[in-house]
Image: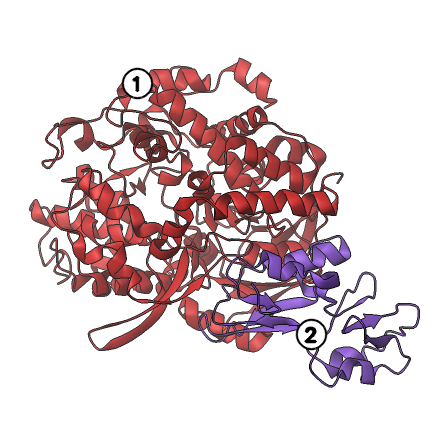
Chain colours: A red, B purple
């Protein structure tokens, strides 16, 4: 491996046979896919048998880092975890912050490729070169916090830990993987871990990473990147408001989905205002290598119960709050905390509950159908009980554990109210208010993910341009370009927040070059990102996805949000031909031969 | 006596201190071998942190523990020096003081040397959790 920043090899773990191995990284893989999401996309495409069921032992999990992970480059602490998703059937990669990925690299591994399934629950323990599978009998069934406390007591304080909770064990289709308070949340990775009977991964690394730039130049280069972030005025807002800072503004702009997207504005979000949330802060927390510091520990009480947990994030406070017609902050924070303990995605959990609330409102479900759960919009008290039932797959919880679309299909009714794309539920930025987000939701490989092209930055915040957020003009190109640059951020792996903190595409290229010794330009960032998005598309096409899957629920084209005086709707179909042309995909959404040749695919 | 002071209430666990320390001293990023390391007990949810760095104020247990004089106290600089030529890798210093680390690759014993009067960890700490001569 001539490039710096990498450990140089990926650990392979076959749970069926208990056999370990390693795959060396090649220069070609690095030059074409960089790391993180790029490696995951390439490996999943190459390694998975077409049509394999997500919960079959034949599915594989790739846990992977990037060249900047753990190397002083700001925010480069993230870990990517990919597999075929049980929620969507598409390929899906989720990310978590914290200290797990850096530790994996210090242990000498860029990633871990997990195949097969264990007969009995196990944990994977990686201590540098010493890799072992141990029985998980004592922790199977424990929540994510209990599991990590027990493992820490057993293994010692130097190990970094990640685990699934009961939701993953019970194959909830949006179960996640938790590292302390950080979640690789979306797409149901936790269920794939559960299907493999892999409860947790513990990693300790004592080795070092060599970077591709001489030390003095490297330190100076990273110092400059840190300075740009530190001096950006947005940084202070991230710090004290976390990700929740935009919630009131977006709501005021009629861009915050409310009551399962029936409206795009909640009447009053003052109870969940970021200043209200900030009142509970006990101390601040950062991920490794980060000087943004958007995390904090909060302490609060609800119904006499004392909680100490992570400050709730924007998407979580929204999905478990306004999306369900709820603004009772302690109830929302309690629900978010329960999702973390049970190990499931707050967003899809909230969306499944909101779906049921609308189905109930529309007369498609009654109290008997929902097993006594009073799933009415605005009922904050139902959240905790519903989440516990979902995780345990008990009664109506077993229906909601399938996700909003899965629940509708299982019952044979209400699919119009499942607000998702490809099965992944839409995020907290209303498609009708931000047409770029709408197109991004429709076309991103993993489904309606807000983080794969956060066009709100260009359509609303004025950070990356000044687009009319309702117009579709120029959006196909904007979405394509942002999807491509984001793929590189996800491959380094840096935090998405750096986009809003002054890190430009040229600076992502510089970050990559500092760590690796590559000499890529801003243009190369776009072409690497294009390759990653294209191979993700090829994976999904192979699984049977078509142009028909690149669409939003009909509601957004048919009904305007009642609070929107402009009466805007969005039909992503009108942007699709142009988007495909920008991508050099044909009118069925299939990459053209010329594109594949140019990208070397 | 001067040393890098740790203010645990300000630390946010970014690990930049141990990353930059190991990089500038060893030429690679290797927090486990850095002369400063922040840890916390993961059996308590996001609980208090501890910092392992030479505080220059103790009885110099590392020097006393070394049977061959590979660790000596430099009165002028006010830091402990390591002589790899003399070290027999008995590792007694690691047992003597929890602030001592070792780079397994080179065998070098890692003890804070204050970066010749400009500690990099203090420079890089984004929260002022590390101070030097009273300054963040």
Is A327 on the left-hand or right-hand side of A299? left
Q: Which mark is residue A275?
A: none
Is A270 on the left-hand or right-hand side of A459? left
Task: Choose between A238 and A260: the one closer to the eye.
Answer: A238
Q: Determine the secondary structure under disc 2.
A: loop
Q: Determine the secondary structure under disc 1.
A: loop
Is A403 on the left-hand or right-hand side of A379? right
Residue A197 x/y as whole percent: 49, 61
Task: Choose between A231 and A155: the one closer to the eye.
Answer: A231
Residue A507 x/y as whole percent: 56, 35
According to the picture, the residue beneath numbered tag 2 turns out to be B54
According to the picture, the residue beneath numbered tag 1 turns out to be A473
Q: Chain of mark 1?
A: A
| Residue at the spot 17% in from the left edge and 61% down from the top edge | A328
Q: Is residue A254 above or below residue B2?
A: above
Q: Residues within 10 Å of mark 2 (few under 14, many from 20)?
A: many
Residue A92 x/y as whole percent: 44, 41
Q: Is residue A437 above or below residue A87?
A: above
| Residue at the spot 42% in from the left edge and 40% down from the top edge | A500
* Res. B124 image quadrant: bottom right
Q: Is residue A600 above or below residue A274?
A: above
Quadrant into which the C terminus of chain A falls: top right
* Res. A67 image quadrant: top right
> In whole angstroms, how far apart are the C-alphas of marks 1 and 2?
61 Å
Let me know if residue A175 appears in the view: yes
| Residue at the spot 38% in from the left edge and 33% down from the top edge | A463
Quadrant into which the N terminus of chain A falls: top right
| Residue at the spot 49% in from the left edge and 45% down from the top edge | A229
């Amino acid at each position: 491996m001539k490039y710096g920043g990498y450990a140089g090899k990926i650990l392979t773990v076959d749970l069926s046979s208990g056999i370990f191995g390693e795959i060396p990284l090649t220069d070609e893989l690095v030059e074409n896919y960089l790391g993180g999401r790029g490696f995951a996309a390439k490996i999943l495409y190459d390694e998975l048998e077409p049509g394999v069921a997500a919960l079959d032992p034949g599915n594989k999990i790739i846990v992977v880092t990037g060249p900047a992970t753990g190397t002083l480059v700001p925010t480069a602490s993230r870990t990517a975890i990919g597999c075929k998703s049980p929620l969507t059937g598409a390929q899906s990669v989720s990310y978590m912050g914290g200290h797990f990925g850096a530790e994996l690299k210090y242990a000498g591994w860029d990633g871990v490729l997990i195949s097969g399934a264990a007969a009995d629950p196990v944990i994977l323990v990686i201590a540098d070169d010493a890799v072992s599978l141990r029985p998980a009998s004592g922790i199977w069934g424990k929540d994510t916090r209990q599991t990590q406390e027990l493992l820490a007591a057993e293994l010692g304080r130097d190990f970094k830990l990640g685990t699934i909770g009961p939701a993953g064990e019970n194959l909830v289709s949006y179960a996640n993987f938790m590292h302390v308070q950080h979640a690789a949340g979306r797409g149901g990775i936790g269920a794939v871990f559960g299907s493999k009977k892999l409860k947790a991964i513990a990693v300790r690394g004592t080795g070092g990473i060599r970077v591709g730039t001489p030390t003095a130049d490297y330190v100076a280069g990273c110092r400059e990147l840190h300075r740009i972030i530190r001096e950006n005025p947005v940084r202070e807002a991230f710090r004290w408001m976390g990700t929740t800072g935009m919630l009131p503004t977006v709501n005021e702009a009629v861009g915050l989905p409310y009551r399962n997207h029936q409206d795009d504005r909640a009447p009053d979000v003052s109870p969940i205002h970021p200043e209200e949330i900030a009142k509970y802060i006990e101390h601040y927390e950062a991920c490794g290598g980060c000087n943004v510091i958007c995390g904090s520990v909060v302490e609060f009480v609800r119904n006499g119960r004392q909680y100490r947990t992570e400050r709730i994030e924007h998407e979580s406070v929204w999905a478990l709050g306004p999306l369900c017609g709820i603004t009772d902050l302690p109830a929302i924070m309690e629900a978010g905390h329960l999702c973390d303990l049970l190990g499931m995605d707050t967003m899809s959990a909230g969306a499944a509950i909101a779906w049921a609330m609308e189905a109930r409102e529309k007369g498609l479900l009654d109290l008997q159908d929902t097993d006594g759960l009073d799933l009415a919009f605005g009922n904050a008290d139902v959240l905790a009980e519903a989440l516990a039932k979902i995780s345990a797959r008990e009664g109506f919880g077993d229906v909601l554990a399938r996700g909003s679309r899965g629940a509708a299909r299982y019952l044979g009714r209400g699919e119009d109210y499942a607000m998702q794309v490809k099965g992944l539920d839409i995020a907290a930025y209303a498609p009708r208010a931000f047409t770029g987000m709408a197109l991004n939701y429709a076309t991103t490989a993993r489904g309606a993910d807000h983080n794969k092209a956060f066009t709100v930055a260009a359509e609303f915040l004025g950070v990356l341009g000044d687009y009319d957020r309702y117009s579709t003009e120029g959006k196909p190109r904007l979405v394509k370009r942002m999807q491509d640059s984001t793929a590189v951020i996800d491959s380094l792996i840096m935090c998405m927040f750096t986009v809003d903190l002054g890190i430009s595409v040229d600076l992502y290229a510089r970050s990559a070059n500092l760590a690796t010794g590559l000499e890529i330009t801003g243009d190369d960032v776009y072409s690497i990102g294009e390759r990653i998005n294209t191979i993700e598309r090829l994976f999904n096409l192979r699984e049977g996805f078509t142009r028909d899957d690149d669409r939003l629920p009909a509601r957004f084209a048919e009904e305007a949000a009642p609070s929107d005086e402009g009466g805007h709707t969005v039909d992503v179909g009108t942007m699709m031909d142009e988007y495909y042309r920008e991508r050099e995909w044909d009118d069925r959404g299939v990459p053209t031969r010329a594109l594949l040749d140019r990208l070397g695919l | 006596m001067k040393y890098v002071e740790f203010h645990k209430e300000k630390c946010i666990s970014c690990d930049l201190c141990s990353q930059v320390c190991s990089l500038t001293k060893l030429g690679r990023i290797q927090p486990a071998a850095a002369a400063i390391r922040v840890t916390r007990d993961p059996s308590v949810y996001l609980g208090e942190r501890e910092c392992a760095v030479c505080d220059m104020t103790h009885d110099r247990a590392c020097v006393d523990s070394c049977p061959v004089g590979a660790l000596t106290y430099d009165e002028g600089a006010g830091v402990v020096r390591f002589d790899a030529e003399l070290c027999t890798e008995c590792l007694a210093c690691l047992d003597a003081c929890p602030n001592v680390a070792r780079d397994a690759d080179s065998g070098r014993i890692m003890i804070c040397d204050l970066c010749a009067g400009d500690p990099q960890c203090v420079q890089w700490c984004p929260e002022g959790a590390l101070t030097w001569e009273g300054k963040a």
